[in-house]
């Protein structure tokens, strides 16, 4: 299912763009799914209460879409499918930290032989999260991580945009914002398809040039001495 319905950057427009939706519901494992559900339950209810369910839904959709776009732009030729709702969840986290920066969050962690509770503001926790994602970007682009930190940061950017955007704006304004993201995606997909088409044309032209060159070399070889003919075939594998 992941290979078929995951978001593949090199084939972003496949299945009519359906993979932008289907990849949101697919996850890499039970831990991945439960982790996203946990953060959705912890922070999502307050954000939904503030925005209302319509704007809240648009926030998740916009954050997921922007996260996917940033992920694709990072490596448009990648054939590795991307799955998960982390982009949308990251948008919720960013909005929560922006709207309720002074809320104290209690983090339970284990240190050495004991367990501890750490109280930290939502703003500080978000900054720590951003720092971790920036480090994750380095490992992602270096090929040492299979977690798309760029998708997380893209989703978080959408959360910040929604925070700046008037919360009492009509849903149609939010639809236009999503429409702009969709147009950006379609433009990129069109550019990607055009680039692939040019690559195929260039590859075909190069193949034809090589074919013509080898044909001409072969014809010329028929007209020269056997010693030159032997030299031609001797050098040909190294061309």
Image (cartoon, rainbow, N blue to C red):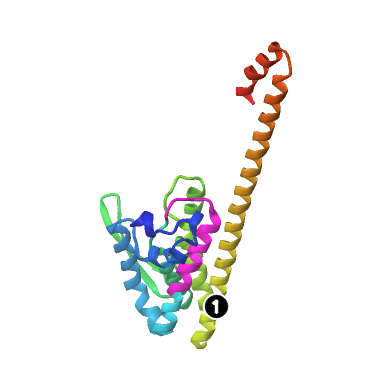
Q: At x 60% / y 23%, what residue is drawn?
A: 237
Say if residue 228 shows up in the picture.
Answer: yes
The residue nearer to you, when weighing 234 against 98, is: 234
Number of on-image labels: 1
* Residue nearer the viewer, 204 or 78: 204
Which residue is at 45% across, 68% downward?
Answer: 64
Look at 30% across and 56% down and name the residue there.
29
Q: Quadrant of residue 35?
A: bottom left
Q: Is residue 49 above or below residue 221?
A: below
Q: Is residue 66 magenta?
A: yes
The image position of residue 50, as x and y in percent, is 42, 84
Residue bearing the label numbered 1: 177
Left or right? Give the position of 114 relative to 177. Answer: left
Camera-side residue of 132 and 210: 210
Give the x, y percent position of residue 152: 46, 62
The answer to whether 49 is drawn above or below residue 37 in the figure is: below
Q: State the image quarter where residue 195 is shown.
A: bottom right
Q: Position of residue 154 (x, y in %)?
A: 51, 64
The magenta segment: 60-81
- Which quarter of the figure is the N terminus placed in? bottom left
- Locate residue 140, reporting x and y percent: 48, 50
69 falls in the magenta region? yes
Crowding at label 1, few (<14), some or many (≥20) Cα neighbours within 10 Å? some
Q: Residue furthest top?
A: 227
């Amino acid at each position: 299912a992941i290979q078929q319905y995951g978001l593949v950057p090199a084939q972003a427009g496949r299945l009519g763009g359906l993979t932008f939706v289907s990849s949101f519901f697919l996850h890499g494992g039970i831990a991945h799914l439960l982790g996203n559900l946990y953060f959705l339950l912890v922070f999502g209810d307050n954000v939904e209460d503030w925005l209302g369910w319509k704007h809240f839904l648009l926030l998740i959709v916009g954050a997921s879409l922007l996260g996917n776009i940033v992920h694709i732009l990072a490596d448009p030729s990648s054939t590795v499918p991307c799955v998960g709702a982390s982009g949308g969840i990251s948008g919720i986290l960013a909005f929560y930290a922006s709207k309720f920066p002074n809320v104290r969050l209690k983090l339970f962690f284990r240190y050495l032989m004991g367990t501890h509770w750490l109280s930290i503001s939502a703003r500080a926790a978000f900054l720590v999260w951003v720092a971790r994602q920036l480090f994750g970007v380095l490992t992602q682009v270096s090929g040492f991580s299979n977690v798309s930190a760029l998708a997380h940061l893209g989703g978080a950017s959408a959360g910040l945009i929604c925070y700046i955007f008037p919360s009492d704006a009509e849903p149609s304004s939010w639809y236009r914002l999503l429409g702009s993201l969709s147009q950006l995606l379609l433009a990129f997909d069109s550019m990607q398809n055009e680039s692939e088409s040019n690559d195929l044309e260039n590859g075909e032209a190069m193949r034809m040039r090589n074919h013509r060159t080898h044909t001409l070399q072969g014809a010329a070889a028929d007209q020269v001495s056997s010693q030159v003919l032997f030299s031609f075939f001797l050098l040909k594998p190294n061309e």
